[in-house]
Image (tube, rainbow, N blue to C red):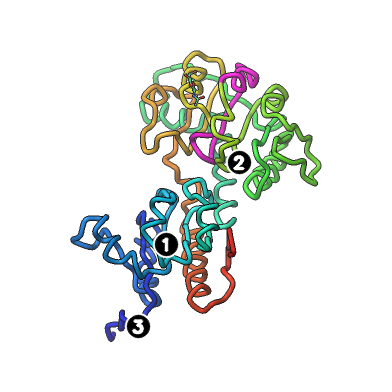
């Protein structure tokens, strides 16, 4: 196969090493000249100054902090395509001010994340991971009494946030016979009871599933008062962003038995997980992978390259967050 002529291809600087490039990097390289700092011998800052003046397009991930200082290094930048659905890592108003368009992963992860939320809830209630440990540790033949688990059906589940993920969690859990209610900024046209206040929602529910975006308004929204309102039988599922919960207070409540359990795919200080959680078998831990499926990566590749193509052909972005 002939070597593609890289010079003809539009340049895209890639920051934050989006995971899916490991799988789709080659396909991407057929249409774009990817500037990858991790393959360069230059230190990152020097790499950026070498390419920053001219590069118009950036591909980044949720770990790339797009601040005003960061953006000031890229005077020609016109589009940022991020592989994340959440936008808490980006200063969107600064992007708007600078006339930089932004595209994100939109809703392509919603089904997979909703599945995982339900999986974590069923796991915590029915002690699936704990039961797996019980068998693996050889306790079954030893007549150790296995604790009773809790029924999924009839559980009162409060969704914190009812966007694309929240709606899918609701639909799934309804099929299990759960009773759904929700909190969000605005009442939505859905048949579920709405509570404007998360503390009130917690008082009415056995389970909280965190499905909202991380914003200034939702940072540490779930604190000790909310957890105490949820109560000793209460369960927290978080597939959204770690800092929506005050993790120190969550750990305290779990250790002291103020709530019954948790299923966590996200943490405040990833990849660090509080030590205390590792020994609790009423807590199911997952390394921020709710969105990672083969199928969603294929969709992500198509969406990301489609957005970049649209940009270079002066067409509307496929999943715009801001269109200047
Ligand atoms: C989180 O909880 C701890 C312990 O109660 C408290 O000291 C801290 O201020 C809380 N953090 C935030 C940001 O509210």
Q: In this rendering, would 167 be left or right of 222?
A: right
**Residue 283 image offset from top left, x and y in percent:** 48, 27
Mark nearer the N terminus (2 vs 3): 3
Question: Is label 2 or label 3 in front?
Answer: 3
Q: In this view, does 98 lie to the left or right of 55?
A: right
- SS state under label 1: strand
Residue 259 position, x and y percent, is 56, 19
Q: Which mark is residue 59?
A: 1
Q: Give the range drawn in magenta.
A: 224-244
**187 versus 73 height, above or below:** above
Give residue 259's mark. Answer: none
**Residue shown at the point (47%, 16%) measured from the top left:** 255
Asked whether 115 or 126 is in front, the reply is 115
In the drawing, what numbered circle is on residue 8?
3
Q: Residue at x 46, y 52 (%)?
A: 292
Q: Characterize the local packing of mark 1: few (<14), some (14-19) or many (20 or more) Cα atoms within 10 angstroms.
A: many
Q: Position of residue 161 (x, y in %)?
A: 65, 40
Query: Which mark, residue 212?
Result: 2
Q: In which quarter of the image is the C terminus?
A: bottom right
Q: In which quarter of the image is the N terminus?
A: bottom left
Q: Does residue 101 appear in this view?
A: yes
Name which residue lies at 39% across and 72% down: 27
**Is residue 60 shown above or below 142?**
below
């Amino acid at each position: 196969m002939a070597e593609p002529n890289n010079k003809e291809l539009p340049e895209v600087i890639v920051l934050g090493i989006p995971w899916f490039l490991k799988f789709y990097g080659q396909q991407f390289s057929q249409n774009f000249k990817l500037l990858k700092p991790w393959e360069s011998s230059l230190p990152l800052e020097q790499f950026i100054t070498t390419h920053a003046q001219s590069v118009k397009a950036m591909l980044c991930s949720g770990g790339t902090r797009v601040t005003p200082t960061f953006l000031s290094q890229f005077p020609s930048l016109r589009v940022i395509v991020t592989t994340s659905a959440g936008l808490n890592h980006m200063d969107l108003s600064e992007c708007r001010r600078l006339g930089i368009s932004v595209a994100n992963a939109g809703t392509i992860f919603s089904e997979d994340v909703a599945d995982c939320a339900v999986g974590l809830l069923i796991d915590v209630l029915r002690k699936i991971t704990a039961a797996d440990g019980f068998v693996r540790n050889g306790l079954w033949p030893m007549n150790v009494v296995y604790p009773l688990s809790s029924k999924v059906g009839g559980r009162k589940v409060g969704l914190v946030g009812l966007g694309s993920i929240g709606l899918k969690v609701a639909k799934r859990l309804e099929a299990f016979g759960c009773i759904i209610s929700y909190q969000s900024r605005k009442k939505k046209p859905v048949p579920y009871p709405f509570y404007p206040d998360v503390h009130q929602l917690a008082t009415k529910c056995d389970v909280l599933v965190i499905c909202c975006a991380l914003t200034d308004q939702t940072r540490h929204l779930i604190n000790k008062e909310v957890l105490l309102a949820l109560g000793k039988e209460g369960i927290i599922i978080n597939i959204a962003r770690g800092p929506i919960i005050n993790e120190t207070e969550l750990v305290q409540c779990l250790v002291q038995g103020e709530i019954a359990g948790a299923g966590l795919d996200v943490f405040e200080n990833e990849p660090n997980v509080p030590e205390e959680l590792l020994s609790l078998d009423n807590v199911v831990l997952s390394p921020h992978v709710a969105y990672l499926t083969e199928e969603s990566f294929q969709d992500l590749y198509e969406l990301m390259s489609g957005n970049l193509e649209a940009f270079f052909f002066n067409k509307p972005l496929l999943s715009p967050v801001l269109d200047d």
